[in-house]
């Protein structure tokens, strides 16, 4: 028996509607997967950018520790100007002062970054906090320690086996004078006897960010 043409057309339309629905679902799934991948990519990029910003902020805050440490050194130098730092063992630069974050020798076994063993623990007992804490603008907390680059602690510089500053240098035509070239009179350092000082600043910030910044001064 031959079916009417209207019945045959109705059957084809039903099958076509099923195929269109199948491809529509596949397309919708592909779009959803692409959207999820895009969101994850954007989130990852945002996290990376945020972490880099926090690290850069922490490194910049380390300058505050260096500047505060240099100010402390300058204040001590002014207060002890009647003593000869080269030979006087009682000079503040020749004596450990952990509460002030100052160490008259560089102990190779004293770690600045370790979490166990002999180390600087970055507390009020062995380092100095730079106020305010934390900084209201960056949210970072800064501490510093100062280490005289000498092998022997608590002795005068001339007997401490120190790492001294180098000779007068010429950098691109600009002379860099040493302290003995500027300071004149008794109590001034002599040539080749200006020990180097290392300042280490530890910065802690948001998302457990920790950065260390070091500077050498003399």
Image: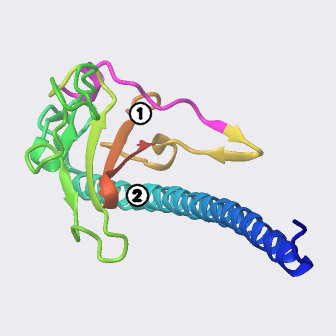
Q: Residue at image x 87%, y 75%? A: 9
Q: Is residue 132 left or right of residue 194?
A: left
| Magenta segment boundaries in residue numbering | 155-169
- Residues at discs 2 and 1 in contact (Cβ within 8 Å): no
Under circle 2, the secondary element is: helix
User: Where residue 135 sits in the image (x, y, percent)?
Assistant: 29, 71
Q: Quadrant of residue 126?
A: top left
Observer-nearest of 45 and 141: 45
**Residue at the spot 57% in from the left edge and 64% down from the top edge:** 39
Image position, residue 24 (x, y; %): 71, 68
Toward which corner of the image does residue 193 lie, by quadrant? top left
Q: Position of residue 117 (x, y in %)?
A: 15, 23
157 vs 197, nearest the viewer: 197
Tell me: residue 25, above or below residue 96: below
Q: Which residue is mark 1?
A: 190
Q: Is residue 161 magenta?
A: yes
Residue named by callout 2 = 58
**Residue that protrudes farthest toward the bottom in the picture:** 6
Which dot marks residue 131? none
Residue 210 magenta-drawn?
Answer: no
User: Circle 1: is it few (<14), some (14-19), or many (20+) Cα within 10 Å?
Assistant: some
């Amino acid at each position: 028996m031959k079916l009417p043409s209207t019945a045959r057309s109705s059957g084809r339309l039903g099958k076509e509607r099923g195929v269109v629905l199948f491809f529509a679902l596949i397309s919708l799934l592909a779009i959803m997967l692409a959207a999820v991948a895009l969101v994850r990519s954007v989130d990852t990029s945002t996290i990376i950018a945020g972490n880099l910003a926090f690290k850069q902020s922490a490194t910049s805050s380390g300058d505050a520790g260096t500047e505060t440490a240099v100010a402390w050194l300058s204040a001590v130098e002014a207060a002890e100007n009647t003593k000869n730092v080269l030979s006087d063992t009682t000079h503040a630069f020749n004596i450990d002062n952990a509460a002030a974050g100052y160490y008259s020798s560089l102990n190779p076994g004293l770690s600045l970054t370790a979490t166990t063993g002999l180390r600087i623990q970055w507390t009020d007992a062995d380092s100095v906090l730079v106020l305010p804490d934390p900084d209201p603008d960056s949210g970072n907390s800064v501490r510093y320690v100062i280490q005289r680059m000498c092998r022997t602690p608590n002795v005068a510089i001339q007997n401490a086996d120190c790492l001294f500053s180098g000779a007068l240098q010429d950098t691109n035509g600009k002379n860099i004078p040493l302290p003995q070239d500027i300071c004149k009179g008794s109590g001034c350092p002599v040539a080749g006897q200006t020990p180097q000082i290392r300042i280490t600043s530890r910065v802690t910030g948001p998302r457990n960010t920790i950065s260390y910044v070091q500077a050498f001064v003399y």
